[in-house]
Amino acid sequence: MVRRNERTQVIADKAARNSFIVLMLAVASIAVTFGSIARTDVPIAPVSLIGLLGMVVHFAADIWLRRT
């Protein structure tokens, strides 16, 4: 069983929050770009890149918060 103290829980929560915010901003920008400007369907490549972006932001935020 893995034990987590309050500090690591706060770090995990902040990293998840940061990645969620970045994901929502990226999804909104893709929706605006392909919904209003391009007037076409959203290709799958930007959607998969958004998922990768969320993972990178989460891990980067986690590492950054653990350093402080």
Image: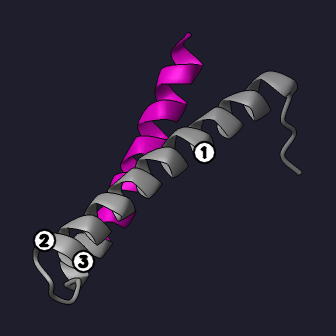
Farthest left residue in view: 38
Q: Which residue, given by chain and number where applicable, does mark 3 sit on?
A: 35
* Residue 22 inside the magenta-drawn segment: no
Closer to the camera in the image, 21 or 48: 21
Tags 2 and 3 in contact by the CB under 8 Å rule? yes
Closer to the camera in the image, 54 or 39: 39
Neighbour class for label 1 at 10 Å: few (<14), some, many (≥20)? some
Q: Which residue, given by chain and number where applicable, does mark 1 sit on?
A: 16
Drawn side of residue 23 relative to residue 16, left or right: left
* Residue 60 inside the magenta-drawn segment: yes
Looking at the picture, how far across and down is residue 36, in whole percent? 20, 73
Q: Residue at x 60, y 45 (%)?
A: 16
The residue stretch that appears in magenta:
48-68
Q: Give the residue type at disc 2.
A: Ile
Quarter-of-image position of residue 31: bottom left
Q: Which residue, given by chain and number where applicable, does mark 2 sit on?
A: 37
Q: Residue at x 43, y 55 (%)?
A: 23
Quarter-of-image position of residue 28: bottom left
Q: Secondary structure at mark 3?
A: helix
As measured in the structure, the alpha-carbon distance from the residue carrying label 3 to the one carrying label 1 is 27 Å
Decide which of tag 2 and tag 1 comes sooner along the chain: 1
Q: Secondary structure at mark 2?
A: helix
Of badges 3 and 1, nearer the viewer stands 3
Q: Give the residue type at disc 1.
A: Ala
The answer to whether 31 is drawn above or below residue 4 in the figure is below
Main SS of the magenta part reads helix
